[in-house]
């Protein structure tokens, strides 16, 4: 590719980026990529850091996220009662976008690589938030949610009414608290 063709491509990319609002996943703006010349893999340029928006994060959760209440029993101790845990996970094949989401909110979460199978064309990653950090994410994005608004409200109600974040004491939770948590677990399950 000649310098003239590259300049034309960069100018076209800059023109197209001026006509639309850029977002964190914008890969069409080659002008900034060409000037940075940082390549992550052959043919892929490292994107410049975009400004973070909570509204963008909410849209990302609406489209790629999962708000859930986990119910589990530890198999090592069958006498142990059921436990419930609030969680939110976001699955994506672009690690930079997940890191941008996590850093923009400033809430601690874990990013894991999903084990690749024959069905995966690209590496997939999961960003997980659990417990109080999941609640913080949900509260931050809830005003902007559309599709998952009811799930977010159910998660907040679960946290408040299910006495999450509190210690049960040596006798464990009273049956009323366990029943409340189970009710919210079933409600969240029905919203899926």
Image (cartoon, rainbow, N blue to C red):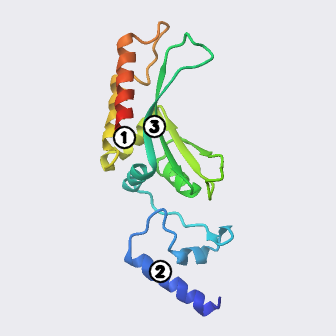
In the rendering, at what x and y percent does residue 162 appear? 37, 22
| Residue at numbered disc 2 | 14
Secondary element at image label 1: helix
Q: Residue sitting at 36 percent across and 54 percent down?
A: 55
Image-quadrant location for residue 150: top left
| Residue at numbered disc 3 | 134
Question: On screen, 179 above or below 51?
Answer: above
The residue positioned farthest toward the front in the image shown: 118
Q: Which mark is residue 139?
A: 1
Question: On screen, 101 above or below 128?
Answer: below
The residue positioned farthest toward the top in the image shown: 171
Q: 18 and 184: which one is in front? A: 184
The mark that comes first in sequence, 3 or 2, is 2
State how far apart marks 1 and 3 are (Cα): 9 Å
State how far apart marks 3 and 2 are (Cα): 38 Å
The residue positioned farthest toward the right in the image shown: 42
């Amino acid at each position: 590719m000649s310098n003239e063709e590259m300049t034309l491509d960069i100018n076209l990319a800059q023109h197209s980026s001026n006509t639309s609002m850029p977002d964190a996943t914008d890969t069409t703006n080659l002008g900034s990529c060409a000037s940075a010349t940082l390549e992550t893999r052959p043919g892929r340029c490292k994107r410049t850091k975009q400004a973070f928006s909570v509204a963008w994060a909410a849209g990302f959760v609406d489209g790629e996220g999962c708000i859930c209440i986990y119910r589990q029993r530890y198999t090592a101790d069958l006498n142990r009662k059921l436990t419930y845990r609030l969680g939110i996970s976001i699955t994506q094949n672009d690690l930079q976008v997940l890191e941008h989401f996590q850093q923009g909110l400033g809430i601690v979460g874990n990013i894991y690589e999903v084990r690749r199978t024959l069905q995966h064309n690209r590496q997939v990653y999961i960003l997980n938030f659990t417990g109080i950090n999941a609640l913080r994410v949900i509260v931050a994005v809830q005003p902007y949610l559309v599709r998952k608004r009811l799930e977010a409200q159910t998660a907040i109600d679960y946290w408040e009414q299910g006495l999450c974040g509190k210690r049960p004491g040596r006798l464990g939770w009273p049956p009323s608290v366990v029943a409340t948590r189970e009710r919210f677990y079933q409600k969240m399950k029905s919203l899926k």
